[in-house]
Amino acid sequence: MAELTVITNNMSESKYLIDFHTHILPGMDDGAKDVEESLWLLRQEALQGVDEVFLTPHFYASQNSPMEFLKRRNQSWKNLSACLEPGLPALRLGAEVQYFDGICSVEEIRHLRIVGTNLLLLEMPFSRWTDRIISNVIELNGLWGLQVVLAHIERYMPMQTDAVWERLRAYGVWMQSNISFFENWRTKRKAASLLTRGQIQFMGSDCHDRTVRCPKWDRVPNQVKNVLMTNSASMMMQGLNTDGVHLEYA
Ligand SMILES: [Fe+2]
């Protein structure tokens, strides 16, 4: 029985910066190719003041079953954890689950939530969402105790009406945005407005590599970081679930 260790700092501190969305686990997807690249990315996260990094490789139902994915993730984690060094952020395993038709009938999906929490990071279709899709997301939120967090919402904003976002929020769906939303001069006002109204719960670098898609927390204004750190810490405390379902994995 291999044990997955969740390394966690003191999250109850009021200022705690979480990178909620990364592709740092080696060899899992289009993110870090090997352990060396993973460590480079984690060192950058530490230098940029990140306290905890969620490791959220892509899960595509068309490529792996949830259990096959978890076995691959377990192996990748073993490779990385054997090489971790002092001074890196705390790490937490998770997944970026791509929405698929029928997701609400696959109970194993619950094992893909962020370890030690009830949070499920959900990647939505890059299209105008149908009523069926929206209804399924609402059904998934709360199913098996899950709290759905939509990944990089800014990508989908131009394609959905305001009513769609209002409906999702009214049913308690949470939102994650990428750093680029706060960096781009065309969108940063909108991003700050959503954050201060509590309509973005988490932020992620969505980093993949050491070239184009690397962590850029140093480009996030301090005021934004301050709001984010306070919001994320309190949201994480609400989302914590210590039932230990994932902590040991064969
Ligand atoms: Fe991603």
Image (tube, rainbow, N blue to C red):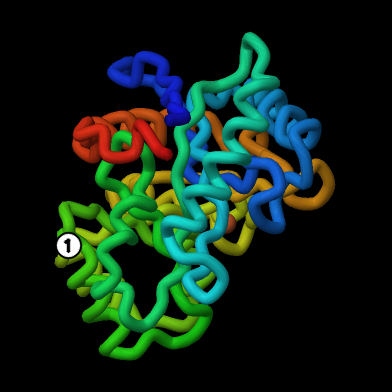
How many marks overall?
1
Q: Is mark 1 within 8 Å of ligand 1?
A: no
Q: Residue at x 44, y 49 (%)?
A: 192
Q: Which residue is mark 1?
A: 143
User: Which quarter of the figure is the N terminus placed in?
Assistant: top left
Relative image position of residue 48 (x, y in whole percent): 64, 25
Q: With respect to residue 154, does 80 lie above or below?
A: above
Q: Residue furthest top?
A: 86
Furthest residue toward front: 1
The answer to which image quadrant residue 130 occupies is: bottom left
Rendered image quadrant of residue 41: top right
Query: In the drawing, does residue 67 fall left or right of residue 49?
Result: left
Q: Secondary structure at mark 1?
A: helix
Which residue is at 43% across, 56% downward?
67
Q: Is residue 235 visible?
A: no
Locate residue 83, reporting x and y percent: 69, 21
x and y percentages locating residue 113 in the rendered image: 35, 49
> Does residue 36 appear to the left or right of 225 in the view shown?
right
- Residue displayed at 26% across by 64% down: 107
Question: Neighbour class for label 1 at 10 Å: few (<14), some, many (≥20)?
Answer: some
Of all residues shown, which one is farthest toward the right? 211
Residue 46 seen: yes
**Depth check: 97 or 169 in front?**
97
> Image quadrant of ligand 1?
bottom right
Q: Position of residue 62 (x, y in %)?
A: 52, 76
Report the amino acid beneath label 1: Leu
> In terms of image quadrants, where is residue 82?
top right
Which quadrant holds the C terminus? top left
